[in-house]
Amino acid sequence: MSDDPVGTEERAPYVESPIIMTTVRIITPFVFTFGLFVMFHGADSSGGGFQGGVIVGTVVLMLGIGFGIETTRDWIGPTLPVVLVGIGVFAFLATGIGSVLLGGGFLEYDVYPIKKAFKYGIEFVELAIGLIVAGVVTGLFFVVAAGTRDTGGDAA
Amino acid sequence: MTPTEIGVLVLALGGVFFAVVAAVGLVRLPDLYTRAHSTSKSETLGAVLALAAVALAFGDDLSTVKAVLLLVFMFLTNPTAAHAIARAASEQGIEPWTTEDES
């Protein structure tokens, strides 16, 4: 096994570890909830879209470590991270340019005709940023996990 | 000193002791498996005892609940992470250190 240079040999199929699986099953919903909690707290206390997005992205990392990286990659599919990033960027831009269209500046939330527009606007933008960060972290994880074997592949 | 202060002190000192044990093991032991062996257990206990001291020091507060939650998750995840690292190393074919390697 150690005679081969790294990467040329076929990897043995991943065998799930009951210890890791149990922990992942217990922890995952809490981590996801905590990530959303951190995202929603961006407006008025510590936290925010970047930190919360990383925590939500960690959920996918944990699933990858628990179920095996190739299984998780097949389950996530090639388009989901890209779609997440796209939706996040679109929501951010729509919020910003929408306020311009309503006669304010870029991301000037007060022109939106809703109560406490400033607070909800910031939280919406934080959610969008969280989506972007979670998608990017997930994509980067799979790119790094793929190693250097296939050159020229992109994030998906 | 009140009983609470004594309890916090005992817990914090226990946490520091186990953290020092983990650090000594990390520096002194020869390879990955022995280091994981020494650090995973004692580092978990060190962190858990320190967090218990924090929870006790907060008293009647929402922060106590947060500290206890942190404690529970630390207790769950830390050994699992050590297990995952040691397992990955074993799958990569890293040989455990034995005294025969020393010559």
Image: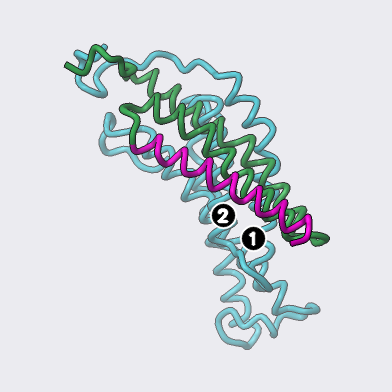
Which one of the lettered chains is coloured green? B
Amino acid on which disc 2 is placed: Gly
Apparent colour of chain A: cyan
**Would you identify the image quadrant in which residue A106 lies?**
bottom right
Marks 1 and 2 close (CB-CB < 8 Å): yes
Crowding around mark 1 (Cα neighbors within 10 Å: few <14, some 14 to 19, many 20+) is many
Q: Do labels 1 and 2 share a chain?
A: yes
Mark 1–mark 2 distance (CA, rounded to whole Å): 7 Å
> Which residues lie in the magenta part?
B1-27
What residue would you read off at disc 2? A53
Task: Tell me the number on the disc at residue A39.
Answer: 1
Task: Give percent across and percent down for residue A152.
Answer: 27, 39
Crowding around mark 2 (Cα neighbors within 10 Å: few <14, some 14 to 19, many 20+) is many
User: Of helix, strand and loop, which one carries label 2?
Assistant: helix
Identify whether B37 is placed above or below A121. above
Work out whether residue B76 or residue A106 is closer to the camera in this orientation and state it: B76
For the stretch drawn in magenta, what is the main secondary structure? Answer: helix
Residue drawn 64% across and 67% down? A42
